[in-house]
Amino acid sequence: MGMYKQLTQLQRYHIRLCLKAGYSLSSIARRLGVHKSTVSREIRRNSGHKGYRPRQAHEKAMTRRYAAAKRIKMTLAMKRLNNRPRKTLGFATPNEVFLKDINNKNNVALVN
C-alpha cells in the first residue's frame, strides 16, 4: 500500500487549468501522478456555485487537516484504564494507576 499524501496547492491550480481546458479526470490524474478517484474526490469536495476554486479548496483542505490533528487518539494505556472498573483501580486516579503500571514494568525490566 502506498504512502498517503495530500494534494498541494500547485496541484489544485493544475486541476483548475486542466478542467478549464476540457481534460478528463483520468488524464488530469495521470498528469498529477495520482489516482483518478483522488481528483474526483477533490473536485466533489471543493466545488461550489462558481465551480472548482483552487485557493478555497486548499483552505478547506488545510482546515480539515488541522481539525483532524486536534483529535486525541486513545493510547493503549488510556484504553486499559477506561476498561477497568473503579473498584479494581483501588479508588486511585487513572494517572496514579498509570504511573504504578509504568513503575512495575520498569522494575520487571531491571530484574531480567
Image (cartoon, grey):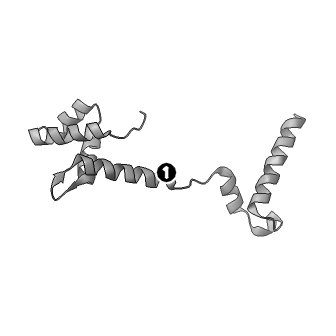
74 left or right of 42?
right
Residue in the foreground of this view, choosing between 87 and 20: 20
Q: Position of residue 24 (x, y in %)?
A: 14, 39
Q: How many marks?
A: 1
Q: Position of residue 50 (x, y in %)?
A: 15, 56
Going 15% across and 38% down the picture, which residue do you hit?
Answer: 18
Task: For residue 22, say whether it is visible.
Answer: no
Residue in the foreground of this view, choosing between 83 and 101: 101
In the displayed structure, would residue 104 be above or below residue 5? below
Q: Amino acid at mark 1?
A: Ala
Image quadrant assignment for residue 93: bottom right
Going 81% across and 68% down the picture, which residue do you hit?
Answer: 91
Residue in the foreground of this view, choosing between 27 and 49: 49
Q: Which residue is mark 1?
A: 69
29 left or right of 17?
right
105 left or right of 2?
right
